Amino acid sequence: QVQLVESGGGSVQDGGSLRLSCAASGIIFMIDITTWYRQAPGKQRELVASITSRGSTNYADSSKGRFTISRDSAKNTVYLQMNSLKPEDTAVYYCNTKRTKYPAFDYWGQGTQVTVSS
């Protein structure tokens, strides 16, 4: 089992920055990929950025150039540095970890609110 605790959300103004953290505990050595998703009110959950156990990263088009996903293996933590935030980035941000091979698993954090005001 994997436990995820997100932190770092808050309220900022247009153009501001935040850094989200996703601290993992449990069988973390079995994680294949960690992904940040977000869900705005009335919208579907969407991928923001992901990082694999080998360090490969992937970004949504809306995140490219503004957000950076990284990992501190010593702290078992994945970060999402968000710069140049826009009001449309307002959402609850969720951390997800997944293992695709047996024994497969898929865990979610509780979410952290990010609010960007104009």
Image: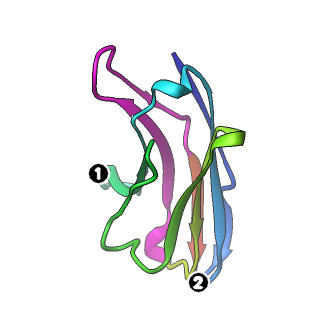
Vertical position of residue 97 compared to residue 60: above or below: above
Q: Residue at x 30, y 73 (%)?
A: 61
Residue 8 lies left or right of residue 106; in this view the side is right
Q: Secondary structure at mark 2?
A: loop
Q: CA distance from mark 2 to mark 1?
A: 23 Å
Residue 10 lies left or right of residue 58; in this view the side is right
Queried whether the magenta region covers residue 91, the answer comes back as yes
Q: Quadrant of residue 43?
A: bottom left
Badge 1: residue crowd in 10 Å (few <14, some 14–19, many ≥20): few
Given the image, on which type of amino acid does mark 1 rest?
A: Gln
Badge 2: residue crowd in 10 Å (few <14, some 14–19, many ≥20): some
Vertical position of residue 44 compared to residue 86: above or below: above
Residue 30: image x %, image y %? 46, 25
Q: Residue at x 63, y 56 (%)?
A: 20
Vertical position of residue 35 compared to residue 89: above or below: above
Q: Quadrant of residue 62?
A: bottom left
Q: How many marks?
A: 2
Q: Secondary structure at mark 1?
A: loop
Residue 84: image x %, image y %? 55, 82
- 37 or 31: nearer the viewer: 31
The residue indicated by pointer 1 is 44
Which residues, given as a range, are shown in magenta? 87-111
Q: Residue at x 50, y 43 (%)?
A: 95
The residue indicated by pointer 2 is 14
Vertical position of residue 18 compared to residue 52: above or below: below
Quadrant placement of the C terminus: bottom right
- 86 or 66: nearer the viewer: 66
- 40 or 37: nearer the viewer: 37
Given the image, on which type of amino acid does mark 2 rest?
A: Asp
Queried whether the magenta region covers residue 112, the answer comes back as no
